[in-house]
Image (cartoon, rainbow, N blue to C red):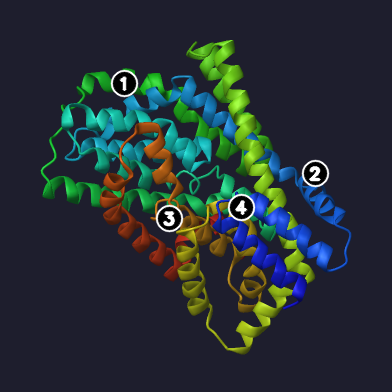
Amino acid sequence: MSIALALCLIAMFSLAAIGTPIAYSIIVSAVIYLAVGGQDIALAGEQMLQGLYESFVLLAVPLFIVAAGIMNAGTISDRLLSFCVAAVGRFRGGLGHVNVVASLIFSGMSGSAVADAAGIGKIIIEMMTKDGRYPRGYAAAITAASATIGPVIPPSIPMVLYALVSNTSIGYLFLGGILPGLLMGAVLMLMNGYLARVRNFALEAPVPLRALPKITANAFPALLMPAILLYGIYGGVTTPTEAAAVAAAYALLLSTLFYRAMSISALYRILVESARSSAAVGVVIGAALILNYIVASENIPNMVAQSLVGLDISPLMFLLAVNLLLLLLGCVLDATTIILVILPLFIPTCRELGIDLVHFGVVAVINSMIGLITPPYGILLFVINAVTRIPLGEIIREIWGFLAVLLVALLLLILFPSIVLFLPRLFGYLG
């Protein structure tokens, strides 16, 4: 390790330890690396701007953020929630099931776990805690757990970022996330059903069957959005980035013309907030691009790959070890940092060991999403705490059961790659 790299790492971890945002910590430490190494510090800005301007795929990120904001403000989320209540609310633990199913549907539109938790999640928590039907912590915990599905079922902002650093097809990554996302929903619903019976949660009054057609018709235009996105991408009509624009435009048309629930002032607020969120993500991406330049300059990925190959480690053991490391890092780092900074270190080794990059990417994204609900950092826990004022301690006490079943699902995906690769191969993937 060079002196410049050592100082870079010391500066980065020191700044992060005192609470400096990770993007700024990386940028400052990168400037230190370039200065100590005798390179032009303007390289930091060059790498950031060049990486951002040349990555057309990154346009999908702000567009999906805008689409999620419009759906939350334009009553689309409310109509989807009414449909979910009618469909699964009649079973024991019904509102918990509604929570998970709503996340499964909403995940096909927003691509963001935070958008899911802060938007439709807030509404369903209020429904669950009304009249004390469910403990506050339980409602918040299952909402946080189900929100992790958002970036797994397409569209997915984290998968867009992984495609950026791995040069993997976004289309096949999106396909690879569908069955794992459904598996995550299934295990969460099983755990919710079990806890509902053990804790004797009240049954909800079922929606009359005669009301189902009207509720379904009301939500049908919104339910079409995932189908439109998937057909556009896999039918060869749009690229994933263009599909993100279609999602935002479709959400806007539904909210303004069809449902007539969006005002000009509300749209302005959504665009401003989306710009802020996109800028925050963009700074992290730019910082990661600078750090990736430093990592490449030090030849770290090849050194890691060669050292692991020399140990004659099996692909399965490598996957298990990397996922264990990612779970630990997920306790203290956000998903974007893990995907942009940590995962590129392991991609050359995956190629050396013959590990499929679509399988690796989907599993790594799911792992990163589990990190969003893992104490002590767990950003989704903080998001829900912020929007509902439910004490963090109550949420953490209830999260462990849902965290456990998601880890079981993750292990199944590691052990059985065909769960991830079935749909991509069905659509022509040769990996």
Left/right of residue 251 with respect to residue 287 in the rendered view: left
Q: Give the distance between the C-alpha atoms of the residues marked 1 and 3, in whole angstroms.
A: 36 Å
Q: Give the distance between the C-alpha atoms of the residues marked 2 and 1, in whole angstroms.
A: 47 Å
Residue 278 image position (x, y, % from top left)? 64, 37
Query: Which residue corresponds to the image point at 45% horizontal and 56% vertical from the top-left?
Result: 371
Q: Kindly identify which residue carries mark 3.
A: 370
Sequence order check: which comes first, mark 2 or mark 3?
2
Left/right of residue 111 with respect to residue 220 in the rendered view: right
Q: Give the distance between the C-alpha atoms of the residues marked 3 and 4, in whole angstroms.
A: 20 Å
Q: Front-most of 242 and 265?
A: 265
Would you identify the image quadrant in which residue 351 lies?
Answer: bottom right
Q: Amino acid at mark 4?
A: Ile
Query: Which residue corresponds to the image point at 52% horizontal and 77% vertical from the top-left?
Result: 318
Can the viewer see residue 393? yes
Q: Amino acid at mark 2?
A: Tyr
Query: Is label 2 in a helix, a strand or a loop?
Result: helix
Q: Kindly identify which residue carries mark 4.
A: 22
Query: Is label 1 in a helix, a strand or a loop?
Result: helix
Q: Front-most of 90 and 60?
A: 60
Sequence order check: which comes first, mark 3 or mark 4?
4
Q: What label does residue 157 carry, if any?
A: none
Sequence order check: which comes first, mark 1 or mark 3?
1
Residue 13 image position (x, y, % from top left)? 60, 62
Residue 288 image position (x, y, % from top left)? 69, 55
